[in-house]
Image: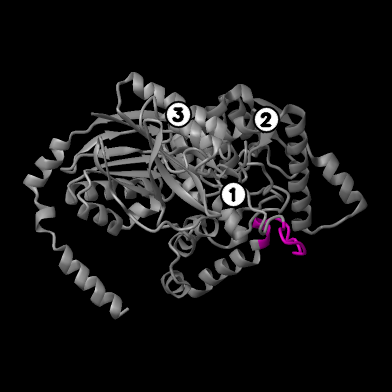
């Protein structure tokens, strides 16, 4: 499942350039966390439409590590892009004063949606498309917040597994420090993807590649990687399928949006 | 005789804009003294049409058809579009020459798997008929037609000098050494040209429809199976190769596949196999 990074970069750069010329939004805006995925997307974006058209938004919360903010700032400096640094603690905590909870998932979802809301605000202010940074591993496992970090206008890395994103990032020259980081949503202190998922991306990606891309029978994959592990992944894939789809619309008319009113996303643009 | 491969990125559903692009590429090919220009599949409409199919369809007496015919006074060309006939819609290749529409191939194999849904929107073509032209005998295939080697075999039996393939192939299967879809077309052309001793001219589009990228990678092979031209991936461009009927003959002297073919035996075997189907 190793990729050709040169050709991958080329098709993504073409894609970003083309999509950013279709609808009058000529800039792109990326939520930059200091992690691998958003750094990779910002590298690709600046190389496609130039740093002058790329906007990075760094949105720490008080649980975000200083290191992440420093890393994000370093990337911004390295690429020479415009950035906004917006602390989301006041907005998020104002809400939780009214609706208190200690539930980490609820708190994390709120943060993810606060960031989404800021990105879409900047999108409209500056005429910039929100560029998604969810990778294929997250999308399949449902490891993301619906209408939060999963929201975007276009996503250039959504068909690359985490390990493939890392391969691409290495080729693009993303700093070593970021390549080596343990993937984390940083929605609470000490959270790591692999800790929460209970499996290393390297292995999960291999399993998903066999199940999804190669469409090998589940039984075969179970035998190869172990029943418990594979079942857990399959369970996550199906249980989170709703997150990957637009809302379900009850069919009443003869031609229904999303069902049999069928046009390409790029129709007449 | 110089043949041009026009690797373009059509705009989805915008026939007017795409027509202008055809004119531009034809004039550029003319400047370079080409005698024929080949555009990709659905070059006038873009690929991911879905419910737009009836809206962009062209009839034999449409204004757009007249414009295409007129344009062929500059140079003969193959273009891809949606043809409406008897209230049916076909994914077709039209050969325009000297102000006339002189041949139509209706796509026979409509892919309906993976990201493809062509059978939902198009009617199927019914045959593979080679035809004679100033460029020798031509057989036309549209994209998935070509992935069934039996289609090329039928043109081989009709002694086609050149097989023209028009494609809108979504790029897929990223691997260590590139995209598997790009390699697939190239492998097919290498085999078809070499073993059916014909020229192959394969033209694939570039650009994006709804998140599907098209890699281009248009190419031509000689009747001895050698690559004559290869266009760059992902970029619009115009490529050229020299066509000579003499090369077809030379290939068939070197490798007498046609002479040694047992079409009747194949026919009998097909009959037997179909009876047992």
Disc 1 is placed on an element classified as helix
Mark 1 residue crowding within 10 angstroms, few (<14) / some (14–19) / many (20+) = some
Residue B155 x/y as whole percent: 25, 52
Magenta span main SS: loop
For the point 59% across and 64% down, the residue is A237
Residue B277 x/y as whole percent: 32, 78
C-alpha distance separating marks 3 and 1:
24 Å
A51 or B260: nearer the viewer: B260
The residue where tag 2 is placed is: A25
C-alpha distance separating marks 2 and 3:
37 Å
Residue B162 falls in which quadrant of the image? top left
Q: Chain of mark 1?
A: B
Please say whether residue A43 is visible from this viewpoint. Answer: no
Marking on residue B171: none
Foreground mark, 2 or 3? 3
The residue where tag 1 is placed is: B54
User: What is the span of residues highlighted in magenta in the rendered image?
Assistant: A242-256
Sequence-wise, which precedes: disc 3 or disc 1? 1
B150 or A224: nearer the viewer: B150
Residue B70 x/y as whole percent: 45, 29
Q: Chain of mark 3?
A: B
The residue where tag 3 is placed is: B70
Q: Chain of mark 2?
A: A
Residue, far bottom:
B276
For the point 48% across and 59% down, the residue is B114
Residue A102 falls in which quadrant of the image? bottom right
Is residue A76 depicted above or below B184 in this figure?
above
| Relative horizontal placement of residue B224, taking residue A120 as reference (left or right) | left
């Amino acid at each position: 499942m190793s990729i050709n990074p040169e050709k991958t970069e080329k098709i993504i750069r073409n894609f970003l350039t083309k999509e950013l010329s279709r609808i009058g939004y000529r800039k792109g805006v990326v939520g930059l966390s200091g992690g691998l995925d958003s750094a990779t997307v910002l590298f690709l974006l600046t190389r496609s439409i130039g740093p002058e058209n790329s906007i990075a938004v760094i949105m720490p919360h008080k649980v975000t590590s200083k290191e992440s903010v420093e890393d994000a700032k370093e990337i911004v400096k390295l690429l020479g892009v415009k950035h906004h640094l917006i602390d989301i603690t006041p907005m998020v905590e104002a809400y939780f004063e009214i609706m208190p909870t200690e539930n980490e998932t609820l708190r994390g979802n709120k943060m993810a949606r606060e960031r989404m809301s800021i990105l879409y605000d900047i999108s409209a202010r500056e005429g910039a498309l929100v560029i998604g940074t969810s990778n294929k591993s997250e999308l399949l496992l449902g490891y993301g917040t619906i209408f939060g970090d999963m929201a975007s206008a276009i996503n250039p890395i959504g068909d690359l597994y985490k390990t493939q994103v890392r391969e691409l990032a290495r080729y693009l020259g993303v700093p070593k420090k970021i390549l080596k980081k343990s993937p984390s949503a940083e929605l609470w202190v000490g959270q790591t993807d692999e800790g929460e998922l209970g499996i290393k991306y390297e292995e999960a990606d291999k399993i998903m590649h066999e199940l999804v891309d190669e469409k090998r029978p589940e039984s075969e994959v179970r035998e190869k990687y172990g029943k418990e592990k594979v079942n857990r992944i399959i369970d996550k894939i199906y249980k989170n399928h709703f997150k990957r789809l637009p809302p379900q619309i009850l069919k009443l008319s003869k031609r229904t949006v999303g069902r049999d009113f069928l046009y390409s996303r790029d129709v007449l643009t | 005789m110089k043949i041009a491969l026009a690797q373009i990125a059509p705009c989805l559903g915008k026939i007017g804009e795409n027509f202008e692009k055809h004119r531009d590429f034809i004039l550029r090919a003319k400047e370079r003294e080409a005698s024929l220009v080949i555009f990709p599949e659905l070059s006038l409409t873009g690929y991911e049409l879905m419910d737009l199919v009836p809206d962009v369809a062209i009839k034999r007496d449409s204004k757009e058809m007249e414009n295409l015919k007129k344009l062929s006074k500059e140079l003969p060309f193959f273009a891809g579009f949606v043809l409406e006939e008897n209230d049916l819609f076909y994914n077709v290749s039209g050969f325009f020459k000297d102000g006339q529409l002189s041949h139509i191939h209706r796509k026979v194999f409509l892919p309906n798997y993976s990201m493809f849904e062509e059978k939902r929107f198009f009617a199927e073509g019914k045959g593979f008929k080679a035809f004679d032209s100033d460029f020798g005998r031509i057989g036309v295939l549209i994209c998935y037609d070509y992935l069934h080697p039996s289609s090329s075999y039928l043109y081989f039996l009709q002694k086609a000098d050149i097989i023209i393939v028009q494609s809108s192939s979504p790029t897929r299967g990223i691997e260590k050494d590139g995209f598997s879809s790009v390699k697939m077309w190239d492998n097919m052309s290498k085999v078809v040209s070499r073993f059916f001793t014909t020229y192959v001219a394969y033209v694939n589009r570039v650009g994006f429809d709804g998140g599907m990228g098209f890699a281009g990678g248009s190419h031509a092979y000689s009747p001895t199976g050698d690559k004559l031209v290869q266009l760059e991936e992902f970029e619009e461009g115009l490529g050229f190769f020299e066509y000579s009927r003499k090369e077809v003959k030379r290939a068939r002297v070197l490798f007498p596949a046609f002479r040694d073919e047992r079409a009747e035996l194949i026919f009998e075997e097909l009959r037997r196999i179909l009876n047992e189907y």
